[in-house]
Image (spheres, coloured by chain):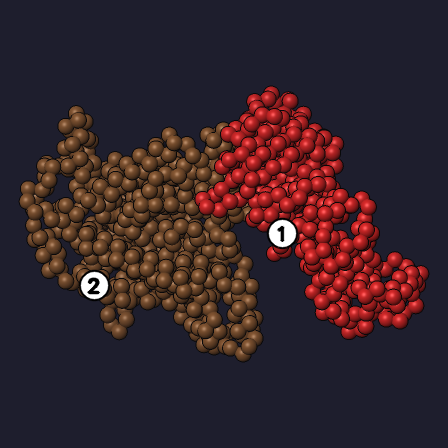
Amino acid sequence: MPCPRGANRIRGPASFRSRSMTQTLPRASARPRRLTGKTSPDVALIYGIAIAFVTLFLIYPIVNLLVSSALAVLNAASKPLPEHFFGYMLTVTWNTFYLALLTTCFSLAIALPLAILITKFKVRSANIWLGLLTVPLITPAFISSFSVIILLGRTGVLTKALKLLGIQFPQIYGLLGLVITQTLHTIPYSLLVLIAGLKTVPRHIEEAAQSMGASIAKTIFTIVIPSLYPHILMAGIMVFLTSIGDIGGPLIIGGNYKVISMEIYSNFISYLGDERIPLIFSAWLILLSIILMIGVNKLMQLTNVKTKFRIGIMEYSNKKARLFGTLFIAIISILLLLPYVAIIIQSFAVRWNNSWLPAAFTLANYQKVAGETGAMLKTLILLGTVTPIIVLLGIIFGQMYKTRPGMRWLSYITLLPFILPGVVVGVSILQGYATVKLFGLSLSGSVILMIAAIAIRRLPVVLKPIEAGFAKIDIGQEEAAVSLGARELKAFMTVIFPQIRISVYSAIVIGMIKVVTELASSLIIYPPGWRNMSLYVAYYVSEGFISQASAMAVIMIILVGIGTVVSNYLTSKENKKYG
Amino acid sequence: MADILVQNLVKKFGTATAVDNLNLEIKKGEMTALLGPSGCGKTTLLRMLAGFETPTSGTIRVNGQVVNDLPPQQRKIGIVFQDYAIFPTMTVFDNIAYGLKIKKLDKAEINRSVMEYLGLVGLVGYEKRMPSQLSGGQQQRVALARALITKPEVLLLDEPLSNLDAALRLRIRKEIRKIQQALGITAVFVTHDQEEALSIADRIFVMRSGKLMQAGTPAEIYARPQNDFVADFIGKSNILYGKVVDVQSQSLRVQTKGAEFEVRRPAHDAARLDAITVNQDVWISIRPHLIQVRAKGAESGEGTAAKHTAANHGVANYGEARLTYVEYLGNYTKGEIHLAAGIDLEFEHYHLDAEHEETPLIRGQDVEYAIKPGNIYLGLDIKGIE
């Protein structure tokens, strides 16, 4: 996978220089040198366990799923698929892509000018706005989906406001609602990727253009934006894949607009549905995602722009552009944050229909939610099991990719869940182990598969910052330690680990946030009695208890917010320590 | 072509003064070097000439016109950067054609012109390449062609060679100089490399801490540095500080730490040294290659050292010393001698006689040395050396 320009000074995992929270694709390390010497048995055992985990819960399930669905299609002659199946598949695929395309276009169309205005025209208090925009970044998409209903649903407060202006807001459920929520949710993401990209455009090329007579506008259109193509592509593909993999949106606001992930889910849980449909759809989605990713990578190679030199960026002092940019980001930020305000109000509401404010305020929703100690306990248990697993796996794979170039191919597999929709991860694991029994108990009824699914899905999120940490360390240090007589494990613990500690901290916190907010694969795989907080929010919304859902969502946002603050604190403390 | 007049120029960044009351004149058709250590304000000055920075006070005139607030687009400058600043998304052709396209010239004219300048920098056949397919030297040639094609009045070069490897640096340096001379364009060349400045420039401005230390031709700056900083920065030199103890019509004596040196007063430098008085604080500069060193008691080719050692007039110009460090470099040997007076001096001994193989100098050996009084340069202005 090519590294977009400015991904990192160090070759290897592309970490955009913005916070790791906002980093995009995890990547395979580039051409590491092999650590000399034979692998000792202890190290081999550790690697073996990690590889076994990935084989059991990622490679086998995906292969199994692809094979089963291929068989289902091939055997369609003897066991016919439902009538008009391929027509239906085509329609749903078209719907999914159409939605993803619209979301990507809107997200980029808003984020690109915004990013340029912010970075190039010294927009006032841009950092404060950007700080606020991390809220949508860290909260799960399904929360913004139902908050949009609060605002723009039939009885929503914005719908009412628009009505006063003489605008009849159309039905929110369906394509419109999906595009709105997904666009809102992905703007901060695109914005940060593009800002990171803009910070890599060296000042001198713009100065060169201007010394040749190019105006500021001309410079931006002929020099800056073309230099940004890799980042535009990167942001675009991430938004596209986010849209394709989104399950919360279609579940909550999708209405009758059928998309692949939702069809997989609804056919999977339905007793009436054909069991082959989710399989075929999942396999189809795996293929599409991979093809898409490969295609984008090829494109990125074509547009890949390398600059060896890093100097400051060019800033322009144009008062009009600056004012416009300030207004623009203020409006977008308010628009993006409005749903969260709505959720907070809703969480204290007795009833909030067709009125500017709820009829009355109450704490009852929180009391109700607090009564659901089960959900919080389940979330805690999942946190306590999944986080250590993925952080350990992250460290093991990080070290493996750095010191064993021969194992590099595996990194493409461990990052696969990043581009795969969560629903697919859930379906593949459940399908793979549906009939397996352990000590006489069916695996599909135990929480083991849920833990495995969440772990596999969130592994790339943790692996990425850890790999970035590894990339900063020269393998020579380890060779030095080994040459001084340390065994590899010892060398790792004493020389390498202290240096990646910061990355591990941030990986832990990001991992925790991502585990708490995981919905898509949990939704498929959770065994009876294992509804965690995000599943509860989804459940409340689907049952129409919007206020309780809001209360639970607020608690989740607070937890996630605390996690982010802690992570920032730890990182800054460590950074200070090591300068 | 243009001449540039800089008067009382000041540039402050916050509380830091990057350029401090600078006055200088850049002459039409000349290659001018702005030379100084990093942070001396040379790049800031260049960026003000280009219009990327606005002076805090003072004026910049191009052809008599004040251009202080003129945006870069209207200045008719070409600029070449240290990092080449090639547009990474465009081919070589499009890079070079960029300025002409901005001017909205017609296609045929652009084509013809681009091919001409590709020829000038020796890159014909490369027009369809992307910058990533070019070496650093080729990229810098593209940058040069791109800067020249719009026929700018001034060509600004911001450390254009510092990212190239040593051999390439010499080649591109020669090419830049030849093209500049062929086109007769006014050029300003920023560098921290004194050898580069000496080799390429018609005129050098030596800067430090935003101030002008000396202006002059390369020969003037090398041979007659105005202060100890310039003497130290341009070429290699042994700088010693001391007091004048005796003034004669032909020569004078300077007492430095532990040793007295005789310095000749050359007739051509009389004016500068006229007002000199006993007890005045001065510095002397002795270029390493002007110190003769040979093994003690060796048969003398010129006989200078031995002759003068015999009658050393009580000055440290001639005498014996201990060789404390030696590097053999083929065409010369360089090293360090420790004088009995406690002074260490760097010397360079050139191997000028291939016919008689010389006895190699060995570290720790006792040597004889000689410094002709006429080879010691006396300076009055003390700025201090970093």
Chain A colour in the picture? brown
Q: Residues within 10 Å of mark 1 (few under 14, many from 20)?
A: few
Outermost residue, left side: A360
Q: In this view, does B336 lie to the left or right of A199?
A: right
Nearer to the camera, B42 or A495:
B42
Nearer to the camera, A74 or A434:
A434
Residue drawn 90% across and 64% down? B307
Residue drawn 31% across and 53% down? A422
Nearer to the camera, B201 or B116:
B201
Q: Classify mark 2: helix, strand or loop.
A: helix
Q: How crowded is mark 2: few (under 14 residues within 10 Å), some or many (20 or more)?
A: some
Which of the chains is red?
A: B
Assign the N terminus of chain B to one quadrant of the image.
top right
Outermost residue, top side: B106
Residue A45 % position (x, y): 43, 74
Q: Classify mark 1: helix, strand or loop.
A: loop
| CA separation in Å, label 2 and label 1 | 74 Å
Residue drawn 82% across and 46% down? B267
Three-letter code for the amino acid on which mark 2 is drawn: Lys
Three-letter code for the amino acid on which mark 1 is drawn: Lys
* Nearer to us: label 2 or label 1: 1
Nearer to the camera, A570 or B90:
A570
On the image, numbered disc 1 is attached to which residue?
B383
Q: In this view, does B306 lie to the left or right of A280?
A: right
Disc 2: host chain: A
Label at residue B91: none
Assign the C terminus of chain B to one quadrant of the image.
bottom right
The image quadrant of residue A194 is top left
On the image, numbered disc 2 is attached to which residue?
A378
Residue A424 % position (x, y): 32, 53
